[in-house]
Amino acid sequence: MNDKLLTVQEIAEYLGVQVSTIYQWTHQEFIPHVKLGKLVRFKIDTVDKWIKKKSVKGRMKRSIDVFCV
């Protein structure tokens, strides 16, 4: 288990998004985070679990919807 707290910059790099996106997500309470006074930090294990919950399973085969006009 990794208890290291990541900074906004570090988690933005980890997720491949802009720092401003991370600040928006924390303001909207979209992404799990820890507030330490004015500082915002992220537990990597918690973020990884959050990502796993957000994952969408793909279908086994592709199907084509046919519409009649």
Image (cartoon, rainbow, N blue to C red):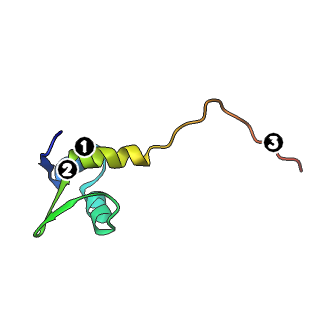
Q: Residue pushed farthest left?
A: 37
Q: Nearer the viewer, residue 63 or 1?
A: 1
Q: Residue pushed farthest top?
A: 61
* Residue that appears at 33% across and 68% down: 28
Label 1 – label 3 distance at C-alpha: 41 Å
Label 2 – label 3 distance at C-alpha: 46 Å
Residue 9 in percent (x, y) is at 18, 52
| Label 1 secondary element | helix
**Circles 1, 3 touching at the beta carbon (< 8 Å):** no
The residue that disc 2 covers is: 43
* Residue that appears at 20% across and 50% down: 43
* Residue that appears at 34% across and 49% down: 50
* Residue that appears at 28% across and 57% down: 32
Where 42 sits versus 13, above or below? below
- Circle 1 packing at 10 Å, graded few (<14), some (14-19), many (20+), is few
Task: Name the N-terminal-most of marks 2 and 3.
Answer: 2
Indicate left or right for 33 with 29 as reference.
left
Q: Amino acid at mark 1?
A: Tyr
Q: Amino acid at mark 3?
A: Val
- Circle 3 packing at 10 Å, graded few (<14), some (14-19), many (20+), is few
| Label 2 secondary element | strand
Residue 64: name its quadrant: top right
The residue that disc 1 covers is: 14
Indicate left or right for 47 with 1 as reference.
right
Q: Nearer the viewer, residue 13 or 27?
A: 27
Instruction: Point out the frontmost of discs 2 and 1.
Output: 2
Task: Name the N-terminal-most of marks 1 and 3.
Answer: 1
The residue that disc 3 covers is: 66
